[in-house]
Image (spheres, coloured by chain):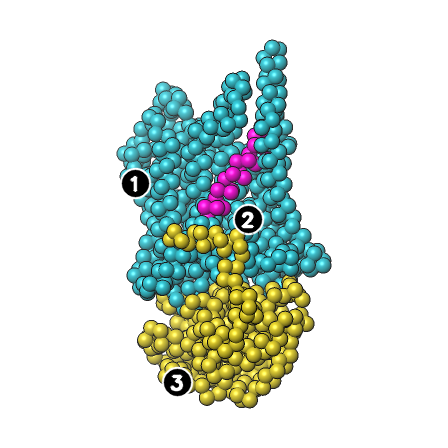
Amino acid sequence: MRSEVVHRYLLLTLTGKPLTKISNITGLLFILLICTVTLLAFYGLIAFSGQGADLDLLTDSYFHSILIFSIKQALLSALISTLLGWPIARALYYLPKLYFKRTFLSLTLLCFVLPTLVLITGFVSLLGSNGFLTPLMGEEWSLYGLHGIILAHVYLNLPFAIRAFYGQLQNIPNTSWILARQLKFSPWQKLSIIEWPALRANYALTFGFIFILCFNSFAVVLALGGGPQSTTLEVAIYQALKYDFNIGEALTLAWSQLLIAGCFFILLYRSNSIAWLNKDSHLGQWQSTQSAMSKIILCAIYIATFSFMLAPLIALIPGVFAANYSVAVLMSIGEALALTLLLGFSCAILAMIIAYWIMQPIRHTLLKQQTSLHIIYQWLANHSLIAPAMVLSVGLYILFLPIMDLDSYGMTFVVILNVLMVIPFAIQQIRARLIQFDRDYGMLSSSLKLGFWQRFSIEWHYAKSILVSTFSLVLLLAMGDVAIFSIFGSDQLKTLPWLIYQYASSYRINEASLASAILLSIYAFLLLKLERAKNNA
Amino acid sequence: MKKIIPLVLTSLLTGNAFAADSAQPTLNVYTYSSFVSDWGPGPKIKTAFEKSCECTLNFIAEEDGVSILNRLKIEGTKAKADVILGLDHALMREAKKTGLMQAHTQSFKQLKPSLNWNDESFVPYDFGYFAFIYDSSKIATPVSSLKELVNSDASVIYQDPRTSTPGQGLMFWMNAVYGNKTKTAWAQLASHTVTVTKGWYEGYSMFLKGGADYVLSYTTSPAYHLIAESEGKYKAAQFAEGHIAQVEVAAALNTSKQPALAQSFLRFLISNEAQQILPVTNWMLPVVKDIQLDAAFDTLIKPDAIDMDIEQLSTDRKSMIKVWRSSAVK
């Protein structure tokens, strides 16, 4: 009875603090802002076309085949990524002394954020008609088609699955293993009683996240699709908006995409987020000992995955040497790189600040146990994950072009839209840690009547490592954007991905490879810095 | 490096960093991005025009020709540009529908008679023929007609007609050659197509890496390799049925505040000076007769043009695409 009163009192003091209230409201305002942008984009499209979605399209068999294909490739990609992720995560977990483990984990992050342009060039060099590995694949091999798309999607998302599962496995408490040893569990029992429950919670989540990413995939499908049979909803939206300028059709496609991705999205956000950027726990884990045979198998899996992740990147290297290293080319690349870094850092900083602030009301609703409000806030804050990027960009373009001089101020829109695109990723990563902080230290900090900044500085120390990792993730994601820049960017200031695209569009393929290699090295450099900072945090 | 950040910040905050001199009038031209790249025609055209016009030429780049048209549709009468440059002739009808095109005051006396150009709003500035390019060191006897290519088993890369003008050109080509047997022709072609790419460059770069025997491109592509790389092995296959041409056009807008300047720019585009610059920067053929070109251009094939009824093609485009997407399935 008494503890209940104390409990209530503490809750009141928590909510009573004025600065906490302000930060809650600010968080809500940011959520409102994000939703407004999406609504404006749709408004722009609807107002311009004077009509809503073209509902006749729903009965067109072409539409049905696009729908089926989109779902099929996303399902297969997600399934294969998660199924393969499991044994690899086990390999990492059971062999703590693997060589180059840190590099492996950095590589998983690199694969996830790799610009698709670079990825596709690498794959084509490796497995295209004239690729290095193509002779090994047999007569009938062709990179282009459903299997090519799935291969590229698996390459991009398998590392994500690996890290997510590895993180989960690391959360298995030592006591479970000690008990297992005492009870003399067989390997099968260890798997089903200890490992699987640990993974099960996050399996659906990982699967859903990868599904959404693959469902909304655009550049990979266009590049490796190989023909009209490989068209997804996002590709169809692009064709409808750009080449036919048929807004009615685009709207139907966009709503369908929102609906389907939205269903998976709900699955995702009903439970905890996936902690995959967490620090490696270097705590002395009590490991169950593995037989020599399983050690060899796990080692082989590790090496195979490592090679798989490195191969397309290495395939880019020959292209670099063929390039024309004139001063003019290097200067343009340098300028473009500077702009990319500037934009990337601005987007990343903004995204982190906004994501942190959005978490305030979300954590608040959790503390006050307002579960339905909690789910609603989360949903609204993260919805840009499922909104088709094309629709947002074009909608805003249509709305604002007659009103303001986009040629001069287009960059602002590039920043805004990039921030919007990466906020869900940021929230996804920092959520678990911040909520954990509330659970561990929430009561203590309120009973000590800590001021806002004191609390914040403690939070910072607690969550620093995840905040640094997330910053790097959103930085790299924002740096790799081409789609938004192609609509809002001006030609005076080019980003590096856009410059690569320009080189490639005008016969200068070797310069494009050089620029891609430079972009890749910057990515690798930033990632290594990140891993070091994270492990020292 | 240190100077770049303040420069970029300033330009982000104050808008156009390359603001025009307020004393001189500015001519705004919408064009596509590869036109204004450092190695494209843009910079040279700008320098040459500004010498004589006492104005500032300001290129505003969109992603490609279709984006220019889309921008006009969105802006309507608020369009900023005085001239649009970079549509191809297949888009002329759509452009005229916006009601923004200004009738030009140019005479076409110096244009090549084979172009047979008599449009009242649009002025052509370069053109090219679509053709399949092959590596002559690997293929000794290339195919000599479209039908032969379709029926052979040579690996082919071409572009998506829905997203790329060469792809659209191939679609018109197939329909012109095969008529109502186009469906089976597409299926036949699909059986030995490596892939269908979104844009020209994806396909072409794949071809350069040895991805296919033939790639759809322009008759002028070998000229680029000859002049820029001294590489003579890439050649265009000449087809007996003739080739589809792509003419790139420019026009003035009737919302322009400097109609006289716009017209003088259009005149400049078909002047000898501009027509000398364009072939070796945009890698297309000049529209004016008797232009002295680099010797490499003499080695190019000189195809017969297929007659194209643009009006009819614009109408049939949607149904042609429907045929393609259901029959070109592998």
* Chain containing mark 2: A
What kind of residue is marked 2?
Ile
- Judge by depth and name the residue closer to the eye, B301 or B29: B29
Question: Can you give x and y, in whole percent of width and height, for residue B311 in the image?
Answer: 64, 78
Q: CA distance from mark 2 to mark 3?
A: 51 Å
Task: Determine the colour of chain A.
Answer: cyan
Chain for numbered disc 3? B
The kind of secondary structure element at disc 3 is helix
Residue on which the image places disc 2:
A416
Q: CA distance from mark 1 to mark 2?
A: 38 Å
Circle 1 is placed at which residue position?
Answer: A100
Q: Are marks 3 and 1 in contact (CB under 8 Å)?
A: no
Q: Which residue is mark 3?
A: B298
Image point (52%, 21%), residue name = A450
Q: Residue A366 occupies which quadrant of the picture?
A: top right
Q: Which badge, 1 or 2, comes first in the chain's sequence?
A: 1
Whether labels 2 and 3 share one chain:
no
Q: Amino acid at mark 1?
A: Phe
Of helix, strand and loop, which one carries label 2? helix
Q: Position of residue A339 (x, y in %)?
A: 44, 53
Which mark is in front, 3 or 1?
3
Q: Which stretch is magenta?
A: A344-365
Same chain? Circles 1 and 2: yes
Q: Chain of mark 1?
A: A
How many numbered markers are drawn? 3
Residue A358 magenta-highlighted: yes
Specify the colour of chain B. Answer: yellow
Front-lying residue, B272 or A150:
B272
Residue at image coords 62%, 63% = A245
Residue A414, visible in the rendered structure? no
